[in-house]
Amino acid sequence: MKKESLSTVALRVVLALGCLGFLSLLTLQINNMESRMVQLGIQNDQIQGNLSKLQLSLRQMEDRIRASGVEARDGTQTAARGAIVSLNPGSPNFLDGLPPEPAPADANMEGHYHKVYGFVGADPKGMNFLLENAADVSEDIREYVNPSLGLRSSRDPSRFYGVLADRIEITDDFREYTIYLKDGLKWHKPVVDYSNPRYEWLKKDQFVTADDFKYTIDLIMDPMVQASHLANYYQDIEYVKVVNDRVFIIRWKKKTYQSVNFTIGLWPTPKWLYANDEDGRAFPKETAGLKFNEHWYNNRAIGCGPYAFVRWEPGVAIVLQRFDEWIGELPPIKNITYHLIQDKNQQLLRFQSGVLDIHELPVSQYREKILDSLESSPYRNGDYQVNSVNEMVYRYIGWNMDHYLFEDKRVRTAMTHAMNRKQIIKNVLHDLATLTTGNFFRFSPAYDNTIVAHDYDLGKAARLLDEAGWKDTDGDGVRDKMINGELKRFEFPMLVYGHRPEIRSWATIFKEDLYKIGVVCNLQATEWSVMLKKMEEREFVSFTGGWGLDFDGDPYQIWHSSQADLPKSSNRIGFRNKEADQIIELLRETFDPEERIRLQHKFHKILHEEQPYLFMYSEKSVYVNQPRLKNVNFQPFRPHVKTLNWYLQP
Amino acid sequence: MKQYIFKRVLVMIPTLFLITLVVFVILQLAPGKPGGPAVVDSESANQTQQAGFMIFKQQFHLDKPVILNLRFFMENSISIPFTGFRIGISPQDVEELLDKAINTGRKHPTKEMVWAIEALEDYGNSIIPQLARLIQYSDNPKTVREALSIFSRNARLPLIHVYGKQLSEDQRLENREIEAENRRIALLVYQASMTDQEVQELRDKVLAYYHSVSERWDYSFLNQMRQVLFETRFAYYMKNLITLDFGISHVDKRPVLPKIMDRLGYSVVLSTLSIFLAYLIAIPIGIYSAVRPKSLLDQGLTVTLFMLYSLPTFFVGTLLLFYFSEGGEYFKWFPTGGYQSITAYNLTTLERLFDIAWHLVLPLICLTYVSLASISRYARAGLMDVIHADYVKTARAKGLHEFVVIFKHAVRNGLIPILTLLGTILPTVVSGSVIIEVIFNIPGIGLESYNAVKLRDYNMVMAIQLISAVLTLIGLLISDILYCIVDPRISYE
């Protein structure tokens, strides 16, 4: 090898160092420039924020002036606002419920609220409210971004208050709804890059009109649009008639109680956006429905509500911002960020690190952080606030009533006696549940509190099985019975939904108890799509299930006997009861609250008598929040967490 | 050499085709099916709206058979024993299906019934001649009614629709014609409450319609063969694949490829860094162990590395988070998770790089420690093989410094096996790690593919599998070529 002289080596080193120095200087320079740009961006945001604050106070002032009776400058407009001419003089406004209490007047109007998105924390499939049927988008985000005509009042859940509608009049036969929209409802601006001339057509201000509601119904009823989960609810609509921009009529084919919920739950869909392609050209009429499914705006949300969609970074977060031109009460929280976190442990750590403002503790974390922790832990010494809410859901075991094992009522009742529900609630669920004996929401008036739950009594269970003819005749420790000349053992499989650990726990306890009375139950932990397939094909004997409830649930879907013979229906267990059918049909036509409760209690009694399900419990969820979150209150129905009157202390 | 590479690339094409076929068939045979509009991962799924679900299936070709389409008219169909396959569909077959699907005498729906309903739905347009035959000639009034009840549903023609693309003027014209015909078909709907007289009228109308379009089902032999091979899910998939179109996700109707690309970046950064780190740490360890075999340090390292190797990552990851993250209870040094801060868009490039690096420390530790054991063992074994070779002894005998002997003479040859390893690692760069991504909440491809499998998003799963198959093949080729370059003794001529 050739030896280099010392001077060449030195020169090389100096040159290398020089280059390095130059490069790092350059990097620093660029970094400085960038940081100045970022600063400018932040300043710009602040200026805009101040501007919108100014607008806000101007608006409040204007409202005050109007309230005090002084004519505002644009006198004509003010006169038009709120002055609706009723089409049915004399009929009362159905929207007579009280809206939630507004936030205190001195609440901080700036805060940025962080929470985990939904129960599973996985990305939503899309942000089109008609296509997306996961509750997280369709209930939670939609109520912020694109609310419905009215909402159930949390102060009196049997009544509704207006959100987009000022007034709804219903004819005496409960078939025709006349709806009057609020004035000045403005659509949010679509989130696109406006520097691109392609989006010029979206720049114009757009207002919500009655047509946008008709468009929603048209889309739902179009078989090409994949909104058939909603089509079930709206297929009984006879017609939608638009009277003018702010007034429309919905007429139903028949009188059904459910029409109240679905009419008031209707939301608008902007036709000016969804009927066009990205360049503003209308889609061909024949395939418009198919194009709607893959619309270019489907990964963003649009609405006219108190919050506007800002951005969605897949796998990271969904961000909303308050829409200051919203005509209703402005919520104090300015930004909402939904973090997309699937792992419960990661969610908890994020909460503890102070990033998240609120966190829902699953049973295992509740035990670890609250039951088994020291007095000094932040969960117990008051550093974090802890609240629990009754979920609108019940868990149960369903029996296939067409199967020879469970066609007898006595057998099903014996099963209930063999289930130690009280101890399970205490020891497996740590009292985060309430025992339930029927299909209605445990804490609604529809639930009959006078019904006494079957107690845990293996002796009683054994006697009932004896009565039903299930005795151990061959001495192998398992009960059996001659059926059609064949000796059948009392042994059955149970499909267990594998997603929730606590269900697996109590299913095992149940299995052990059954074994003591000579019944063999084989647990099969199953994935949901396989479970669904087996239930559709009625290839099951029993399964564990859960059912999410409405405040005033319609039992038709699960309990009417007409549903038992349909393939893929929700009456999977084959429940057929003439009296129950009558009550279900009556309930659909009864609007008188007291009469409804009487019928619901009667229905509850039948279910208790028949024991088609082994009703287990209704869960409570536990929320912990940072103390900076103020005015924390929960709705008694879904979505329980609604932050419109919450605020964050600066 | 060039010829060799050319040959290898040529062989890749049939290999890839076979891989595609096998993965495709296995995927389609897995239980569960893609959710149409109503089948969702929740307890409150409602009844499917038949028409909507049929259109969904047609748009994604889910109503077609997987690899062979044997649904043509035959007077007497031939059943292939033991396989459940039938060649052709005869009117009797349809009659049997109708009996199973619409029998009201039965107490409750059964597996057979659900299966028959689905079969009738999927056969769609191809059983129209059989239905017409039943309607015309059957003397059983029940059969006529049953056939009528599904005729109008199955006769509907699917509209031409290409996801994400504008239709040409001709296609739009054709769509308008199809729509007009569908409107005509919609008038032929049967209702259970119809009297015999009304059924008779409907029957005449249906037959009149059928005879006006019946030439559609008069296939020539060639056309029939074409239908058998190409009117299948696999053929449609391959047709797209040849133009490198991975299709549309059933779930959100967006093209699959950009969705994968969105996620891929995170996983590639993470796994490349981790592979680099693993080699950086493991090779020196391997060299040391080979030079001083059976020394205390060698044995100590071996035991430690194998202990690390046997610790599951989800356990170590949780521990790391608990002890070293901001949300934990001890040393709040690192962020709790994520790829970068949620406010990263307010940072300059340099700050952002640091931010990402700071976020990646814990996940990188988790990803790296597992592979240390195997790589260092490979390095050790490779080096041990050559360290006693004659040429190394010669080098020593020449009086070279031990350092030069090891690094210049031994290591170069001893680490050739490690190169092969590098080639096989290539596909792991894109596959990502579900566990690490879940625990540290990194929006990578591993998590995405797991969710795709759960939702039975066939196109998404296929695309990820195929990309990883292609990379495996390329990786193997690269490692073979590298062999050749570093070791001139090896030649493929």
Image (tube, coloured by chain):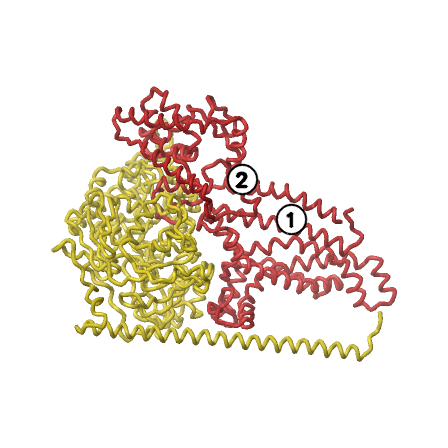
Q: Is residue B31 visible?
A: yes
Residue A484 coordinates in the image, percent (x, y): 34, 27
* Residue A19 in which image quadrant: bottom right
- Residue A128 to residue A99: above or below: above
Name the side, left or right, on which A533 lies relative to A230.
Answer: right
**The disc numbered 2 marks a residue on which chain?**
B
Residue at the outermost right position:
B398
Name the side, left or right, on which A200 lies relative to B475.
Answer: left
Q: How would you rate the neighbour count of disc 1 (Cα within 10 Å): few for under 14, some for 14-19, many for 20 or more?
A: some
**Under tag 2, what secondary structure?**
helix
Name the side, left or right, on which A22 lies relative to B366.
Answer: right
Residue for point 38% across, 58% down: A301
Looking at numbered disc 1 in the image, what kind of residue is underneath it? Answer: Leu
Q: Where residue B25 is drawn, which disc sits there? A: 2
Calculate the distance from the C-alpha at mark 2 to the C-alpha at mark 1: 21 Å
Q: Colour of chain B?
A: red
Looking at numbered disc 2 in the image, what kind of residue is underneath it? Answer: Val
Residue A292 coordinates in the image, percent (x, y): 39, 49
Residue A307 coordinates in the image, percent (x, y): 34, 64
Q: Colour of chain A?
A: yellow
Q: How would you rate the neighbour count of disc 2 (Cα within 10 Å): few for under 14, some for 14-19, many for 20 or more?
A: some
- Residue B313 to residue A601: above or below: below
Q: Nearer the viewer, residue A46 or A504?
A: A46
Q: Nearer the viewer, residue B41 or A450?
A: B41
Screen quadrant of the N terminus of chain A: bottom right
Q: Where residue B473 is drawn, which disc sits there? A: 1
* Residue A570 in which image quadrant: top left
Residue A83 coordinates in the image, percent (x, y): 18, 62
- Residue A213 to residue A495: above or below: below
Q: Earlier in the sequence, mark 2 or mark 1?
A: 2
